[in-house]
Image: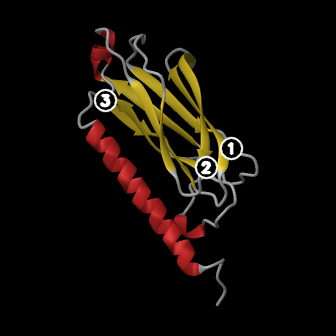
């Protein structure tokens, strides 16, 4: 029977990824219990089945996205603000010294006009480490019925699996109706 590397370490790695995903999801659920928006994730262009993932020396991924406080246009408009939080993970076997995370909020009804853009560099992400990247709070936001949020963790040097580096969300604001 052929195996890839140490089978028990591979299974432990998969369990670690699942555990971190659950913990990050629980954290986001606690932070944002209710929200007046609906977020629809777009399916990845090339889904990757966990059973077919081979450990890579370099592999960073987005594991979650949330807002703090939960996105509410009315509160932002009343001199409040909202900050985007993106959870990233080093799924590779090597430490990554600099990981660049980019976020764009777009207006899908205006030819994908860019409303907000920010990039944050994360220093020293160890193998298996999950870090929540908090973007600068936004307090001025044009009212739209729909927004599109594109989040990307730029591929690190030597990374070959990039299907988990990019997420797109359609956001529908109920306050715009």
Q: Residue at x 43, y 61 (%)?
A: 18
For the N terminus, which image quadrant?
A: bottom right
| Residue 73 rendering spot, x and y as whole percentages | 32, 17
Is any part of residue 3 visible from this angle?
yes
Q: Position of residue 2 (x, y in %)?
A: 67, 86
Residue 102 in the image: above or below residue 106: below
Upstream in sequence: badge 3 or badge 1: 3
171 shown above or below 45: above
Front-most of residues 28 and 171: 28
93 vs 172, nearest the viewer: 93
| Residue at 66% from the left image edge and 48% from the top image edge | 96
- Spatial distance from mark 2 to mark 1, Cα to Cα? 7 Å
Q: Are marks 3 and 1 in contact (CB under 8 Å)?
A: no
Other-residue count near label 3 (Cα within 10 Å), few / some / many at <14 / 14–19 / ≥20: many
* Residue at 54 percent of width and 31 percent of height: 150
* 64 in relation to 102, above or below: below
Q: Residue furthest right?
A: 158
* Pointer 2 or 1: first along the chain: 2
Looking at the rendered structure, the secondary structure element under dot 2 is strand
Q: Which residue is mark 3?
A: 70
The residue that label 1 is drawn on is 155
Residue 43, horizontal then vertical, whole percent: 50, 46
The location of residue 31, given as percent across then percent down, is: 29, 37
In this view, 175 is above or below 78? below
Q: Going 31% across and 49% down the picture, which residue do you hit?
A: 26
Query: Within 10 angstroms of label 2, few (less than 14), some, or many (20 or more) residues?
Result: many
Please say if the residues under marks 2 and 1 sit with CB atoms less than 8 Å apart.
yes
Task: Give the SS element for disc 3.
Answer: loop
If the image is split into quadrants, where does the C terminus sit? top left
Q: Which residue is mark 2?
A: 60
């Amino acid at each position: 029977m052929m195996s890839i590397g140490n089978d028990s370490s591979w299974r432990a790695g998969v369990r670690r990824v699942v555990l971190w995903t659950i913990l990050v999801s629980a954290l986001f659920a606690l932070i944002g219990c209710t929200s007046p928006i609906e977020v629809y994730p777009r399916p990845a262009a090339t889904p990757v089945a966990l059973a077919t993932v081979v450990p890579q020396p370099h592999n960073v991924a987005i594991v979650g996205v949330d807002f703090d406080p939960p996105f509410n246009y009315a509160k932002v408009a009343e001199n409040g603000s909202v900050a985007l939080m993106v959870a990233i993970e080093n799924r590779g076997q090597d430490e990554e010294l600099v990981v660049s995370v980019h976020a764009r909020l777009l207006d899908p009804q205006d030819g994908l006009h860019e409303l907000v853009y920010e990039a944050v560099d994360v220093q020293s992400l160890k193998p298996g480490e999950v870090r929540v990247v908090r973007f600068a709070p936004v307090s001025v936001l044009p009212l739209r019925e729909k927004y599109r949020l594109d989040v990307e963790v730029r591929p690190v040097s030597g990374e070959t699996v990039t299907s988990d580096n990019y997420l797109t969300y359609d956001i529908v604001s109920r306050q715009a109706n």
